[in-house]
Amino acid sequence: MENAIETVKEALATLSLNKLRTGLAMLGIVIGIGSVIALLSLGQATQKQIESNIQSLGANLLTVSPGFQTQGAVRGAAGGGTTLTNEDAQAIAESPSITTINNVSPELSSRSQVTARRNNTNVQIIGATPAYTSVHNLEIEQGSFITDTHVSSRSRVAVLGPQVVTDLFGENANPIGQTIRISGQSLMVIGTTVSKGGTGFMNQDNIIYVPLSTAQKQLFGQDYLSSIAVEAKSADVMTQTQNEIGYLLLSRHKLSEPSEADFSIFSQADLQNTISQTAGTFTSLLAGIAAISLLVGGIGIMNIMLVTVTERTREIGLRKALGATKKIIITQFLLEATILTIFGGIIGVVGGIVVFYAISKLANFLFTISFFSIALALVVSGAIGVIFGAYPARRAANMEPIEALRYE
Amino acid sequence: MIHVSHVKKIYKMDGVETVALDDVSFDIKKGEFVAIMGPSGSGKSTLMHILGALDKATSGSYILDGEDVGKLLDDALAKIRNRKIGFIFQAFNLLPRFTALQNVMLPMRYAGIPSTERLEKAQRYLTMVGLSDRMAYTSSQLSGGQQQRVAIARGLAMSPSIILADEPTGNIASHQAQEIMEIFEKINKDGHTIVMITHESDIAAHANRIIHIKDGKIIRDQKNGKRN
């Protein structure tokens, strides 16, 4: 044990002798481990974020979108068609044969410029019915949501997402009773929603809700729906419900074959799987690249150790003359390589966490670090030292003492 | 104690055989101070390497303290070098980053001696060679003579059966060489067996037996009348 501590001290002293070389040799490992940590954490965070986003969109949710499904070379852009009507939504809700649904929410969604006082912003406008809140787990912060009366009388009212409130009226303002303008029409704000989070295309806070009829007749001038959201009674009946809605709509649209369908139905689970898979593939791809940089780092370590062994040939010869066994020489050089990579690994872990922290702040990601990945990174960096240090150490140990002593 | 009989060493280089040692036999008893003299290429360095368990003879036997060194494997040879042989080189061969004290302690570390004992012995031997005030100096801070004295202390550290010195004064100014030889005589009086290679007769004159070799053969092996 005493000897072990001394050997470690000696290795540290040797490594600190040529700081620039030691630093450069470490750099490969630092970058490799750093990118592994940053990328794995980023991948995990993305996955978690997507899952929580999709959960907040509503559980047991089926979405019916207009447009043709994949069919040969021709594919109608999902959501681009004009095949879903208010009557379709009503038929789904009132069909005696479909008993597994809780709520049906017909929706018309479009982006538009919105102004209030002097501020203006570009937001998603959703024409909705009262069913929307229950289907999408939407909660009201202030005021109230759209009612049946609003829908039937095409009231000019609007409910704002928190992001819209901030953009149009400022932080923590109370917009209830204020007027906003969309497409030349004035609407009165009657409520605001609780923040649901989400970023980019998933941002659920940058939305204005208006009565469906108001959206169709007064804002966008169209009778069609951009989607029908259906809340099933439980996760177990999703497939059954999906099929029943499919057959109902096929018969309503006078189509005989499922392959001819001018609409598509997908569940939240499908979406979640697709996105998770994509994110997973992306993560493994990045991790693969990081692994390659680790390999390159390891080769760098081997190279430096070979140079070191050659430079210290006389020292090795002397040590052998003084009675160092092969094991002692191997231990000495293996230890130097391993200390190099473990230090590199520690710096890499810290660097990776810092980079990931910066990204999570900038892109508004969840900042979580798994201790498993840190432990793994350190074990891997130690292993790299042992693997890539083995050959140089063996070469040192196998030197003939007289030849080594004669070396100039 | 040292028993060398019919030792032959043949080097093969690019298919050409060179005979470095040709049927060399001699005994060295405990407490002797032997100088091996010869011109360069005479085979004295080869003999030194064989005596130091750094190299093996092509044929013949070398027995040190009853052990047939020629038959030992690498790790056993390392142990022999560690316990039974104290090397003193022409170029000193101190580890440059180490202090005098650390250099002397190194062979004791390989032997697994506890650090307190190592320190105590190293201090004792460095004091003996007159370097009690230079123990924390690294080799770059020491003169040639001082470095060689550190090497002597290191050679003595494991109380070896023989001290093997290869041109110990070759790289040292002459007045310092005199001091080194005085130390050799002193440790020889203390009972250490010394085998020293040199080509300088005034250095060899400090020994009590001189073996002359030429072309790989012993041509003369005699007591040194001046000392005995």
Image: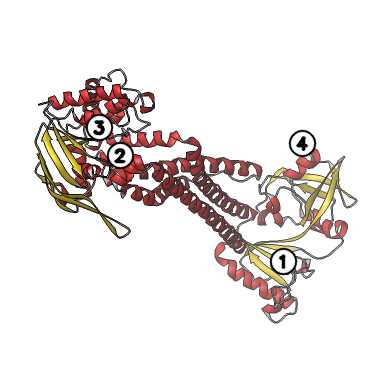
**Residue at which label 1 appears:** A65
Q: Name the image quarter holding the C terminus of chain A.
A: top left
Q: Amino acid at mark 4?
A: Ala
Q: Nearer the viewer, mark 4 or mark 2?
A: 2
Q: What residue do we see at 38% from left, 24% from top?
A: B141
Q: Amino acid at mark 2?
A: Leu
Q: Amino acid at mark 3?
A: Glu
Drawn side of residue B170 relative to residue A14, left or right: left
**Residue at which label 2 appears:** A318
In space, the residues marked 3 and 4 are separated at their CA atoms by 102 Å
Most foreground residue, B216 or A164: B216
**Residue at which label 3 appears:** B200
* Residues at discs 2 and 1 both on one chain: yes
How would you rate the neighbour count of disc 4 (Cα within 10 Å): few for under 14, some for 14-19, many for 20 or more?
Answer: few
Q: Which secondary structure lies at badge 4? A: loop
Task: Name the quadrant containing residue A75.
Answer: bottom right
- Mark 2 or mark 1, earlier in chain: 1
